[in-house]
Image: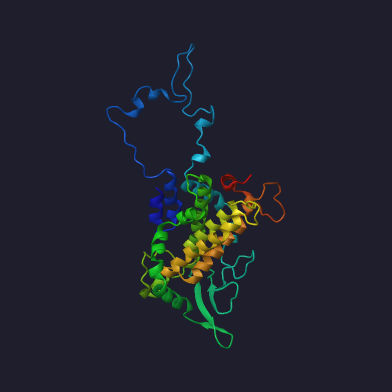
Amino acid sequence: MGANTANTANTANTANTANAGNAGGGGGGLFIADRVDLPFVKDGEVDHGRVGWRQTSTTPPVPLPPICPPIGPLLFFQDRKVDPFFAGWQVLEEFSATQWRQHTPFRAADTLDPIGSGNIFHSAVNPTKHRVNVTLSANDNAATFVTSCKNDTGTYEPCDWEFDRLLRASVDERPDALGEIIAQDKEFLSYFFNLLSFNPASHPSTTKVMHVASLIGLFCCQYWKNRYKRVRPVQLFPGLMPPIATPGHAAFPSGHATQAQLVSKCLLQLLPIALIGGTTQSLQSIAEPGLTRLARRIGRNREIAGVHYPSDSIGGRHLANKIFGNVLELALTPISAPPPPGIPAYAINMPIYRRLVEEAKLEWGWA
């Protein structure tokens, strides 16, 4: 079922919330054959192994119990048995009830005031050379994206910097990156599994948190893609000829960049901060550079493939940071009434996500 969801989305991103779970042996494409003449349920006394359905001989007769009598936890579906794919959808329901739209649009500055237009600088550290001016329409019209370069007089003028960068990447980097581009097209959560040396069987709750992050990232970026409606680079520059199918939705922000960045940030918060063996390092500090670079590399590969502009990746990382900082991180605030000062009430109404994070932290050795 998860694989079908990926196909209808035509993004390659939704598959992250389904395919990676297969490594844990969860619900999926298994087929269990049974015999016709001797079905398993009639093999020996197998049919005696059932709860609350068999009528016993009593005087006077006792009515048959309900099919699911509340006689213990056995008859309630345990949370730990929820497939990671569907755990993501459960958290998405509570996430959608927050004020996520007000706190996730692209912003010109790192503030809490949501705006729809602004500048994306190639380098947030030294924004002196290239920028992309974004103007979001007040109605359903597409946003405008104007790439500019600073000239010798110190003023910005329109240029082909983003296209030039994509052209160079397709020629100079694509042959070497092709393996990663194809591998990460449909699923990239396995790269995070490998980076931190765990799997769905060893860390089931951590796996669920990853699926949550991937699905929420996809959900939010699809909303903003439909608002900005940015044309794909290959539609303006067919010669890029991507080695993978161009996704059937708008370019900005990059879904891969959004999801990878959000997965990396959610994973990082699960890792212990206790120092290791008398050193000055913790598992969190050791893993942070790798998680950060892996997320950026996944987004960058989509640029090399020719399906995203560099500013799409920047916008995706920015969106993920806002999802994490303005919603998911605040959702872990200890519950109190009224909420703690500075913590909006909307942010703490995510009990499923809170429980998953608490369980995942135990898998990494938190006391």
In the image, 313: left or right of 108?
left
Q: In which quarter of the image is residue 156?
A: bottom right
The quarter in which the C terminus is drawn is top right
Q: In which quarter of the image is residue 48?
A: top left
Identity of the residue furthest to the front in this view: 278
Determine the residue positioned at 47% across, 24% down: 52
Q: Position of residue 236 (x, y in %)?
A: 40, 75
Q: Position of residue 192 (x, y in %)?
A: 49, 55
In the image, 364: left or right of 240?
right
Identity of the residue furthest to the left in this view: 37
Q: Quadrant of residue 244?
A: bottom left
Determine the residue positioned at 46% across, 21% down: 64
Q: Where is residue 251 in the image (x, y as percent from the top left)?
A: 45, 67
Q: Considering depth in this image, is 254 or 165 the residue closer to the camera?
A: 165
Determine the residue positioned at 35% across, 22% down: 44
* Residue 242 visible in the picture: yes
